[in-house]
């Protein structure tokens, strides 16, 4: 992913709605998950993380500590923080 662009936290924070796009960060990566929101098994709870970090939420919902969840996330990577 060395060829992907870098984004500031400020730019990520602008993307916290379905209208403007839903971006999240995870371990230094930036992900545009707009298209995934409607497919999320946990429903609209996913929007709580919109514009910010997944870590605080994923530590609460351990269901995400699985390889297949990280594989889904990786499909949506658009850059790095
Ligand atoms: C379940 C992905 C963000 C809450 C799941 C599952 C996947 C997933 C694949 C099903 C896991 C399984 O059963 O094997 C994602 C991705 C996220 C994300 C890719 C971010 C890009 C969040 C956030 C929250 C959340 C931010 C809470 C604020 C939940 C809950 C479930 C769940 C509560 C359990 C649903 C159920 O089984 O009834 N998520 N999730 N997720 N997620 Fe997420």
Image (cartoon, rainbow, N blue to C red):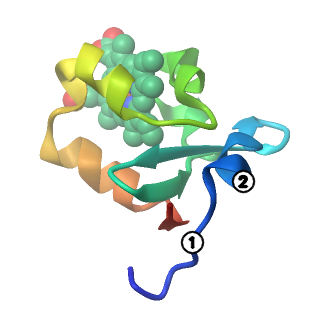
Residue 41's spot in the image, x, y percent? 41, 24
Between the residue at mark 1 and the residue at mark 2, the CA separation in whole angstroms equals 10 Å
Query: What residue is rendered at 34% in x and 32% in y?
Result: 55
Residue 37's spot in the image, x, y percent? 58, 34
Name the residue furthest right: 19
- Which of the two residues, 81 or 67, is positioned nearer the viewer here? 81
- Which of the two residues, 35 or 22, is positioned nearer the viewer here? 22
Residue 50's spot in the image, x, y percent? 61, 32
- Which of the two residues, 22 or 69, is positioned nearer the viewer here? 22
Q: Which residue is mark 1?
A: 6
Query: What residue is rendered at 63% in x and 37% in y?
Result: 51
Please give the label number shown on residue 11: 2
Query: What residue is rendered at 37% in x and 21% in y?
Result: 57
Q: Secondary structure at mark 2?
A: helix
Please give the label number shown on residue 17: none
Name the residue furthest bottom: 3
């Amino acid at each position: 992913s060395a060829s992907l662009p870098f984004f500031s936290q400020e730019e990520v924070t602008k993307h916290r709605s379905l209208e403007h796009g839903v971006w999240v960060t995870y371990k230094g990566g930036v992900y545009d998950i707009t298209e995934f929101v409607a497919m999320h098994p946990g429903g609209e709870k996913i929007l709580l993380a919109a514009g910010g970090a997944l870590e605080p939420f994923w530590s609460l919902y351990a269901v995400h500590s699985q390889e297949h969840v990280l594989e889904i996330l990786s499909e949506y990577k658009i850059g790095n923080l």
